[in-house]
């Protein structure tokens, strides 16, 4: 149960109101009122009191208040009733405006706003009341207006004369009576009570509940109500309604802009029935509009609004946009919302507010959505630019790039050599395309999912990439890219890849560049001071390591050594090792790989000096290193001087039904121990070399993959320890190192207590762990994952956002069991979840020491880690 | 630490001695003595006291006892010192006999047994003492005897004259002194103390410990000692040593048989230096031996032995074989062992003993090893038959069959049609071979493991099968099977498959038939009365169901519907369904499959009437149903009148990287709901049909495979419920059914609390659950599982014996969580572990309702279930 109580309170006395009691809008209006902003007087009815109304009826639960409010209403006064759900995002009822007009009270209103306006307001009340309270069809009233417009021969409803509104009023009354079999209620109390009843009941219907649940609302989500004096944007003097923003959505730089409709009520602006006026003359000049701007129509109004924005910023530490109404030249605020804005703007505004002292640094950290930081890391298409979108796909790797279409990796390399940007377009990519991808400015594939080869490699390279662009057709024969509208593009034509949105755009729209300095840098440094969990990077190559180091990483949490063997000059030695018939031949090949592996690791250690580097021993099944095509097999056979049949036979004997669950990881290490021996030696020799050169000593961390039984780890440990001792003796150095286990199988998680006894660390490989916990291969899940998420079978793709309920429980269980037997155990998470803010929150709460993510996710992870630490210190419940 | 204490006790006072204190042999001798059997007097030295001897020396730890024993020894008396390890199977020291002969005591012994025997006994003591106490080389003494035999010109040592033994005695003394640099000890005390010291120390040497560990002994395994008066089988009157058995090892029918050596000591019989006499004249007649039988040589001895066997049976509830010595015509028992016997014998003996009231029915149940029941279910090669073994492989499916070699399924069918038995020999089998396997009497494959296609299918069919017979070579070109010794066999040659032992035998050795009546039937009925857990069968076909019903099963726990689609007349319709481009086409194909599926299920329900039948909805990925070879694709394309390219393309698009973790199970049900719709309809219509015909109503249980999220089960449930309602309305019947979830993913186990809310049952598919918990594909694990188990990386193959520590924890967790939210939840286990006794014990302890196993494992499971119930009621700790 929530900790609220049935109550109602004057809006201007409710400065401490919280959202659980009075809803998001109610609480916000009360705060605005508290710092002196012009909010119309009103009364907040609490969530629990509204629940009581739903159960007992408005008369029983709220009769006194309704009588009092109605009794105090001036003869020409009107009321507005608005819903205030706990979260605006959960949806809620339309406001009912102009409550309080009756036949008896009409003359006073006419006195105030004139006969036309009064009749229009009365018409609006009956229509609103009919639809929202009595469930009438909105069409009925719209048809009346439509017919009247035609009948009066005007161009729109704004031009209807007073008599037309008088006639519409009568028609509305008749329609209401015909539909509801009752005359329109002729007392303020009855109108208000009925409206409150309706809003309370509607919220609690099953269909409303289902709709809300779809938006993430909990079962017991509540709504509060706001009863407020109507400010009339309609009338004969300077009046109208509008929306005003005060910062540039893209950059966060102060800028006043917005829309205004003279002689209108709030919803009119939002619904866009009439073309609104702009706010400032500067804006109007830029847009080339002839209609006057608000500051030209009602002098002083914009200055007033800007002053109010400043007040709100200092008083509430937030940069708001305002929904406002001008009544007889006076500005009133109907609502205020933290302005929509780009991440760059959000970062600048948050840092500015914190520097002004309006908010704390911690609040500044909490205000920026970590995921949106990708906008800083890569160039983006200017949000204001015109887009000629050719097709859509999955936003596989963020950022945007413009270049010439190429259809092969070779062309990409050629273009790159000439200093030109290439956009590589492929049906799918394969490992052979990697060099082409290195040379491309962006990548588009017609097939493939978020975890396809192209997507994974592009994210690693920080290359804008759209995959699965099924809208587009690649005519391989004629070398053409065909857009969804039939336009076709040849090699050399200019396109732009928007990997942030997942769009392919024709031509070269305006771009905004990456931005890693200024406010971004400041916010990051604040985040680093706060966060209580390390952020490491998954980095396999010196390039990855340099990128990560550039993003101020705390170390490498996962270096996959196998990637080192795919280099052109190594793959054949690796293949010799795999094809060896005897242990001796295998060792001979490994002896040749040793210096190559050692050199790579020396480079990595040098880049990362002073920071921990976790190196994972060989993981993939050996068949991944063998050639797949007949041609390649022939080439290899020639190079190795063996019959091709021998290569075919070995490839066949290594083939696996389920490679993911096959002979890989520590299973290779146990059955062919000489492979790990070589790797351990390379690591220790590299450490010895680097430690002689540097003052900052390297402490290598060696990680054993795919463990499912403790004995596997023990067997590897015995050999690694022996090799460490041997290297130290040979090189007459002393080395410190740490040996740990990668927890990727559910069994390793269950047996973490055993594993921790002889491990310095456990690192959760949540990619594989998720696959095994779900019994779901990532490579194969792509074909139905979108359906699954769309149908709500899985709330989210568990490969993107950590499955807290299942995989998360295994993580918690393992960390508790591990720490129980080894209190100094280091716990980390590597895998793509390491860059996911929700997963980082989870790891922070679970007391992990680090998360490790791809280099380009490092800033996101640093910010998310800081947020998690702040929220956990504040004791707030996490999502 | 064990709960014993350093002590020694008179053997005849130690009737309650337990094995942890006095070892297996010591405890058994004490029990024999207690019930009045003639066991020589003696003293038991406890395990802990022996450990103390090892630490402090015999003099310090046991000096008093040694003095007392030596002091009380008559002048012509001798002692035997035997080890008594906690388990005989762990091995232990050779007994030291004839302790107590010294030069001074020799005359008294000569008085008793004559000079030749006395000298022989002294020689034996010196040799035994030299070897076991002083570590001399046994060759030294054997050479002396060998040379003496040559020198005396006799045919063997039994014929050496007294003088020769006197000479040998002197030679032995000299050899002893030369080797040990000490004269042979000349006091009873010294001899005994030194022998005790040696036995205690030897047990505790590192090499002995390693040897024991290899036999399964724990680190702290102990040994007790038995000091006993020597009964002399050597002497001038009726004497000798022998072994007597009282039941037929094959059948368990009472039968007296054995071996006897006149004038010999126990070990002589076992070592087989001389040809022994038989025990009874009947035996002798059957064997056609001319040498007299014991009952002819020493009248009354065999009658005495039979009487002792009867006493032991009534007194101790066990059918023993005896190791005996006859001294001056008196029978003494040196040891008694539960006779080696076949399972059939074990069953008959256990039932006989229980009928006699010597043991309880529960004890009878506990005495039979469930795994050995396979001997009852299938014909076996007569254990006494001569075997001409051609090669060995894995014992993939038990039983034996003789027949003519065939090399193709077609030949098997042809031979079968002629009423002849065929033994199908293949390199490996594939699904195309299934019909051939149906027609074969036995199957041999050269490759493949215990979970290969051939092995799995053969077990299902109850067909004797040897796989991975790497000893054999299949010369496919010349159509020859080549044995390991080079002999080659053609099609039509007679061989015998021994699937129980994993051997291929030439010709047609004598066989014993399956036996499911008599004692077997009785024991099974007792087991059924006791057991607290149901035993169901995994049965896909009517044949399986009939087999299972024949084994008195409690229902079907797993019917895999996909097998129904592999029939020749269905597979093409199934393929049409898979190749359909639209939902409509798919539904059209499914409409044609519906009556086929319904008919199958009607048959199944009819066979199983009155018992629950759990039907699993379609599980395998769709590509499994498509043809794999180019030829088959062409045939299919013609049959369906579509271009072959379309079939290739669909097969390609359905191909998966890891089919085990792919789009299968409920993932098909969610994304192509019309498939499960059809299956649910078939099940309900079948139930309606059968329920109209039978008084015993069918309650179908529908099982959803591969669930990983509760929502999947809910979505299927909603549709299944709707179809049930529709069928009931259409057919105007009322149907009861139960819907449950197959728990195969670790996540389903973790989320069992959710799943149980809307499930009637959870059935653990431990095959897949093991694969996913370990991250290990069964199909791929074969390549290194043997290494893994041999190296002790895994204590056992987790696909054979349930991994209690990992998978078992998930099972326990899931059952607790499931029962917590749904107290009436039924819990079952299907998968091959359902037939594994240790896993059945686990399920019983975990409070499961049933296990389900392959039909031929049902009797084994019934017995194992009864044992588990008894042990758990007795509160005994389980292995």
Image (spheres, coloured by chain):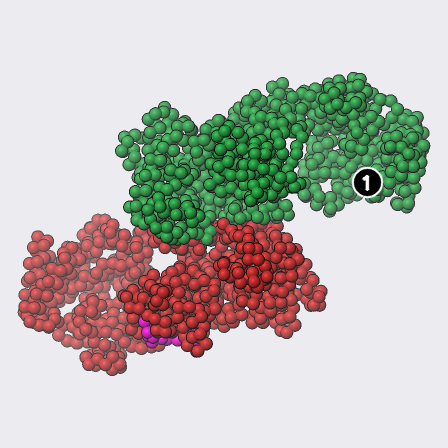
Chain colours: A green, B red
Residue B291 located within the stretch drawn in magenta: no
Can residue B704 be seen? no
Q: What is the x, y in percent for residue B182? A: 8, 53
- Residue B13, relative to residue A276: is it above or below? below
Judging from the image, what secondary structure is the residue with disc 1 in?
Answer: helix
Q: Residue at x 51, y 48 (%)?
A: A777
Residue B839 vs residue B663, the one in the foreground: B663
Give the quadrant of residue B16.
bottom left
Residue A392 vs residue A474, the one in the foreground: A474
Can residue B655 be seen? yes
Q: Residue at x 48, y 26 (%)?
A: A550
Q: Residue at x 73, y 47 (%)?
A: A206
Q: In the rendered view, does A736 fall on the left or right side of B141? A: right
| Residue closest to the far front | A478
Q: Residues within 10 Å of mark 1 (few under 14, many from 20)?
A: many
Q: In the rendered view, does A337 fall on the left or right side of A633? A: right
Residue bearing the label numbered 1: A132
Badge 1: chain ID: A
Q: Which residues are magenta?
A: B506-517
Identify the image quadrant of the C terminus of chain B: bottom left
Q: In the rendered view, does A437 fall on the left or right side of B443? A: right
Q: What is the x, y in percent for residue B555? A: 54, 67
Residue A781 vs residue A215, the one in the foreground: A781
Q: In the rendered view, does A601 fall on the left or right side of A126? A: left
Q: Residue at x 8, y 52 (%)?
A: B181
Give the quadrant of residue B411.
bottom left
């Amino acid at each position: 149960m929530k900790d609220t109580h049935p109550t109602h309170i004057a809006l201007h006395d409710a400065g401490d109101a919280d959202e659980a009691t009075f809803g998001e809008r109610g609480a916000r209006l009360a705060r605005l009122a508290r710092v002196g902003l012009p909010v119309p007087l009103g009364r907040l009815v609490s969530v629990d009191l509204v629940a009581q109304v739903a159960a007992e009826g408005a008369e029983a639960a709220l009769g006194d208040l309704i009588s009092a409010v109605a009794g105090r209403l001036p003869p020409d006064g009107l009321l507005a009733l608005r819903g205030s759900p706990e979260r605006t995002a959960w949806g809620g009822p339309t406001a009912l405006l102009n409550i309080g007009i009756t036949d008896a009270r009409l003359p006073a209103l006419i006195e105030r706003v004139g006969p036309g306006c009064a009749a229009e307001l009365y018409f609006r009340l009956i229509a609103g009341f009919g639809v929202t309270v009595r469930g009438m069809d909105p069409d009925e009233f719209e048809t009346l207006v439509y017919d009247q417009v035609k009948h009066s021969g005007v161009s729109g409803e704004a031009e209807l004369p007073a008599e037309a509104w008088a006639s519409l009023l009568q028609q509305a009354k008749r329609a209401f009576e015909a539909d509801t079999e009752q005359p329109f209620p002729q007392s303020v109390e009855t109108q208000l009570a009925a409206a409150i009843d309706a809003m309370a009941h509607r919220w609690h219907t099953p269909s409303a509940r289902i709709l809300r649940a779809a938006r993430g609302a909990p079962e017991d989500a509540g709504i509060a109500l706001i009863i407020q004096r109507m400010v009339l944007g309609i009338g004969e003097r300077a009046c109208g309604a509008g929306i005003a923003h005060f910062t540039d959505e893209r950059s966060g730089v102060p800028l006043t802009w917005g829309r205004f409709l003279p002689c209108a009520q709030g919803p009119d602006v939002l619904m866009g029935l009439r073309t609104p006026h702009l706010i400032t003359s500067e804006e109007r000049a830029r847009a080339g509009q002839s209609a006057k701007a608000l500051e030209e129509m009602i002098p002083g109004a914009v200055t007033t609004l800007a002053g109010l924005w400043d007040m709100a910023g200092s008083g509430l530490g937030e940069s708001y946009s305002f929904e406002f109404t001008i009544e007889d030249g006076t500005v009133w605020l109907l609502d205020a919302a933290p302005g929509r804005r780009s991440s760059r703007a959000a970062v600048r505004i948050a840092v500015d507010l914190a520097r002004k002292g309006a908010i704390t640094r911690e609040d500044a950290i909490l205000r920026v959505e970590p995921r949106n930081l990708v906008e800083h890391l890569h160039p983006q298409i200017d949000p204001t630019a015109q887009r000629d979108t050719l097709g859509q796909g999955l936003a596989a790797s963020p950022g945007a790039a413009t270049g010439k279409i190429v259809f092969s990796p070779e062309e990409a390399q050629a273009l790159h050599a000439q200093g030109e940007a290439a956009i590589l377009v492929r049906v799918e990519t394969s490992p052979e395309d990697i060099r082409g991808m290195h040379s491309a400015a962006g990548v588009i594939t017609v097939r493939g999912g978020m975890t396809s080869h192209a997507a994974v490699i592009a994210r690693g390279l920080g290359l804008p990439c759209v995959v699965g662009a099924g809208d587009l057709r690649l005519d391989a024969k004629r070398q053409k890219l065909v857009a969804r509208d039939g336009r076709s593009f040849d090699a050399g034509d200019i396109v732009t890849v928007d990997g942030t949105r997942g769009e392919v755009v024709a031509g070269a729209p305006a771009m905004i560049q990456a931005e890693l300095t200024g406010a971004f840098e400041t916010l990051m440094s604040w985040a680093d001071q706060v966060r209580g969990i390390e952020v490491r990077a998954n980095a396999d190559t010196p390039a990855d390591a340099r990128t990560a180091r550039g993003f101020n990483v705390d170390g490498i949490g996962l270096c996959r050594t196998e990637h080192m063997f795919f280099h052109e000059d190594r793959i054949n030695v690796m293949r010799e090792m795999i094809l060896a018939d005897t242990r001796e031949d295998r060792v001979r090949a490994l002896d040749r790989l040793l210096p190559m592996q050692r050199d790579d690791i020396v480079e990595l250690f040098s880049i990362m000096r002073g920071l921990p580097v976790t190196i994972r021993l060989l993981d993939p099944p050996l068949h991944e290193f063998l050639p797949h095509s007949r041609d390649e097999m022939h080439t290899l056979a020639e190079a190795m001087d063996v019959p091709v049949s021998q290569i075919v036979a070995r490839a066949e004997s290594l083939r696996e039904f389920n490679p993911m669950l096959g002979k890989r990881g520590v299973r290779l290490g146990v059955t062919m121990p000489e492979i790990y021996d070589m790797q351990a030696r390379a690591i220790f020799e590299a450490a010895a070399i680097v430690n002689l050169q540097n003052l900052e000593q390297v402490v290598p961390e060696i990680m054993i993959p795919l463990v499912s039984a403790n004995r596997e780890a023990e067997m590897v440990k015995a050999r690694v320890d022996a090799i460490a001792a041997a290297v130290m003796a040979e090189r007459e150095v002393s080395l410190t190192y740490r040996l740990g286990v990668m927890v990727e199988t559910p069994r390793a998680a269950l047996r973490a207590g055993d594993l921790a006894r002889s491990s310095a660390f456990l690192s959760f490989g949540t990619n594989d762990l998720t696959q095994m916990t779900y019994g779901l291969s990532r490579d194969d899940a792509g074909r139905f994952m979108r359906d699954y998420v769309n149908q709500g079978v899985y709330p989210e793709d568990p490969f993107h956002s950590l499955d807290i309920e299942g995989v998360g429980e295994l993580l918690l269980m393992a960390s508790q069991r591990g720490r129980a037997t080894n209190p100094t155990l280091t716990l980390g998470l590597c895998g793509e979840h390491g860059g996911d803010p929700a997963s980082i929150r989870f790891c922070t709460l679970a007391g992990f020491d680090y998360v490790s993510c791809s280099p380009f996710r490092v800033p996101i992870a640093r910010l998310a880690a800081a947020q998690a630490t702040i929220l956990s210190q504040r004791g707030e419940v996490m999502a």
